[in-house]
Each structure stands twice: as C-alpha cells, then as structure tokens.
Image (cartoon, helix red, strand yellow):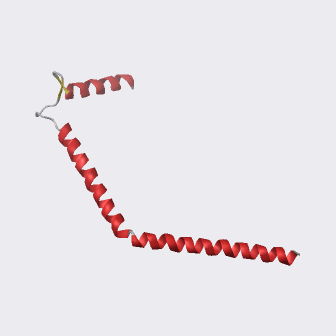
Amino acid sequence: MIMDGLQLLVMGMVTVYLFLIIMILGINLVSNLTREHSEKERLAMLKQEQELRDKKRKKLAPTSAVQTAGSVPVAVFAAAIDAFEADRNR
C-alpha cells in the first residue's frame, strides 16, 4: 500500500517535470521563430516614439528669442518663484 503511494508520487512528479520541460522547449522554439519579427516591431516602435518626440519639440519650440507668457517674459516668472522659495526656506 505504501509502495503504491510512493510509486504514484514519483509518477506524478515525473509527469509534471516532463510537462515543464516540454513547455520550456516550446516557449524557446516560438521565441526563436519570432525573433526577427520582434526586432522589426521593436525598431518600428522606437521610430514612432522618436517621431512623436520630434513633433512635440517642434510644437513646444519658442517662436521668438525670448519666451513670453502673455506679455511677461518667462525669466521674470522664474525669478519670482526663486525669490518666493528662498523666503519660504528661511
């Protein structure tokens, strides 16, 4: 009776082990078969991201030498924020 239980235990463990080995081999096979396609897809995504970044840069690029927010230059805002933070940290 105990030997039957041990035999069943070993057979179950061997079955699971073989299944996992077959699954790993299958995953590696699919990975090798789709490697070229995956690389093409990755390069296409990188190109698309670069194009989006370039569009955003063109859209956000200043039209004149001095950026303005309304009629006040941005440098004035930056100086005011620095002064406020300096007073607050004292």
Whole-percent x, y for residue 78 in the image: 25, 28
Report the residue at 34% width, 26% height from top. Answer: 85
- Compared across the picture, whether 26 is left or right of 78 comes to right
Q: Is residue 64 left or right of residue 28?
A: left
Q: Quadrant of the C terminus?
A: top left
Q: Quadrant of residue 84?
A: top left
Residue 86's spot in the image, x, y percent?
A: 34, 26
Query: Left of 85 or right of it: where is 74?
Result: left
Of residue 33 and residue 42, the one placed in the foreground of this image is 33
Q: Relative to 86, say whether 39 is above or below.
A: below
Identify the residue at image location x=12%, y=34%.
Answer: 63
- What residue is shown at x 52% (from left), y 74% (from top)? 25
Image spot of residue 6 (x, y percent): 81, 75
- Name the residue: 28% across, 58% down: 44
Q: Quadrant of residue 80?
A: top left
Outermost residue on the left side: it is 64
* Residue 25 seen anywhere in this rendered image of the structure: yes
Direction from residue 82 to residue 26 in the image, left or right: right
- Do we see residue 90 in this rendering? no
